[in-house]
Amino acid sequence: MAHSAILRPTRGTSRSLRELAPLLGASHHGPDAAITGVALNTSGVVAGDIFVALQGLNSHGIDHLEAALVAGALAVLTDQRGASTLSSSSEIPLLVCEDPRSLLGTLASAVYGTAAEGGPRIFSVTGTNGKTSTVFLLEAMMRAMGWRTALSTTALRQVNGVEYSSTLTTPEAPDIHAMLALARESDVSGVALEVSAQALNKNRLDHVRSTVAGFTNLSHDHFEDFGTMENYLEAKAALFTKDMTDRAVVCCDTPWGVELASRMSIPVVTLAGSMDISAQWHYEITQADHERSTWNMVGPAGQELSLSASILGEHMVANAALAALMLISSGVEIDALKAAMGTGTEGVPVYIPGRVEKVSQGPGPQVYVDAARSADAYEHTLETLRRLTSGAVVMVCGTSGNRDATKRPIMGKVAATLADVVIVTDDDPRKEDPAVIRAGLLEGARSVVGAKVHEIADPSEAIRFAVSLVGPGDTVVWCGPGSQSYRDIQGVKVPYSARDQARSALREAGWTAS
């Protein structure tokens, strides 16, 4: 269960507006105030905060100032437009600058004291696919070594075993710095962060210095933001600079990883699965079944590391190898990893929600939910399950609205090429017409000659239809929602669990669920 409290340090210090104004290059108006926290929205305000009123898509944050003050905010940071709405006689402590968003990291770092020496090692992971899995694997490995840990992913934020809700892949800068301050306060040794290209573009990691930054892969996605693969890589590359990280580990399984590694100005270690790819470290799967994978890693000087975990597929093993190598690059001894993880049935003590997550049990069909929402992710998941399946592979799939529409036909074509049956359904439409989203996937799926393709808009009906088609030896995979606990429909987050629906579908069909 997610913790109900707002993620904040409990022993914070205060900074006065008079101290903060020159640091931010902001003008100070009204009385002084002692600030202990930073909030971007009224629901996150804690007494003693400075409320940052930004220009949004549809409104300005200054419109919500009264609610922020009622919640306990002591001051406001805003732009000229926001300040112009306030009365000249206003006694609200106020900082004004041209671009408040660009200063969030500076402000939060100053208020929470995260730039101080010491503190936990920070491991940041970026790439198209595998970020969440790599962060969970990093955290599990650190925990197995006896470290206190913290992590931030799309699925979950956690500090020293306490869970907090998460909605953004990478939280806004004030939330990241508050988490790091709490981690330091909790004597956490290692923090694992999932970092999106959008977060880097929006300065959410400003004043966060990583011990090691890791790169998983790059594939067609988010063209609604970046337009081309080159622009997309450029956004990711911002993490791998002297100002943001000490050293890097790059998976070179995609050409984009090779390209990124070649331009590094910081120490970099490279990793690949194929011996045909030039890299310092290589990994190889030595054993795999429906429950677990075992793999071996070999380094440039003949170093060897064999690990095991409850993960499936070469793409997931690549994530695990990346996580291990990031720890080694931070100074962890290989023998310490070996001793902590072992190679037996225990392996890495990891549970990754919604990433090729098995929800079936017993001798019936194998049923999985997965967060795949790109053609590359579809390919990896389907190829993995095909190798483990003696019978048919049935795929239920949908994807997000108000996101890159150009990838949808490509996703549909991959689905119909690699699965025996494809059922296109609704997923997370946001404010887009779900029929239009389905049409994009269906266009690609129906372009495959002989493909068996169905359209069932209701995802609960779609998974039940999928389960009705299978028996022992067959596999169903539901790609899209993963561990997400809601569906965003016209801006309303409607509670919904694909895992619960898949388990119910199995039980209704007479099979056993986990």
Image (tube, rainbow, N blue to C red):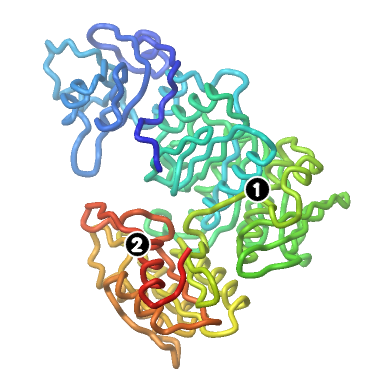
Asked which secondary structure carries label 2, the reply is loop
Which amino acid, by three-letter code, is at mark 2? Ser
Specify whether 253 is left or right of 413: right
Q: Nearer the viewer, residue 145 or 513?
A: 513
Residue at 34% over, 62% down? 400
Residue drawn at x 57%, y 41% as measured from the top left = 124
Q: Position of residue 39 (x, y in %)?
A: 32, 27
For the point 73% across and 54% down, the residue is: 307
Q: Earlier in the sequence, mark 1 or mark 2?
A: 1
* In the depicted structure, whether residue 402 falls above or below residue 161: below
> Would you call the spot at circle 1 few (<14 residues within 10 Å), some (14-19), or many (20 or more)?
many
Q: Residue furthest right?
A: 302
Q: Position of residue 209 (x, y in %)?
A: 57, 31
* Label 1 secondary element: helix
Residue, disc 2: 400
285 left or right, relative to 27: right
The vertical placement of 406 against 103, above or below, is below
How dense is the environment of label 2, judged by Cα within 10 Å: few (below 14), some, or many (20 and up)?
many
Residue nearest the observer in this picture, 347 or 402: 347
Quick one: quadrant of the N terminus?
Answer: top left
Q: From the viewer's side, name the closer residue of 53 and 502.
A: 502
For residue 141, side relative to residue 299 (left or right): left
Across and down, in percent, residue 202 comes to 41, 40
Percent across and percent down for residue 206 are: 48, 32
Give me the residue at 61% from left, 58% from top.
Answer: 256
Viewer can see residue 160: yes
* Vertical order, 251 against 12 (above or below): below
Residue denoted by label 1: 323
> For the residues carrying marks 1 and 2, which lies nearer the camera in this image?
1
Query: In this view of the protein, can residue 265 be seen by the observer?
Result: no
Distance between the Cα atoms at labels 1 and 2?
28 Å
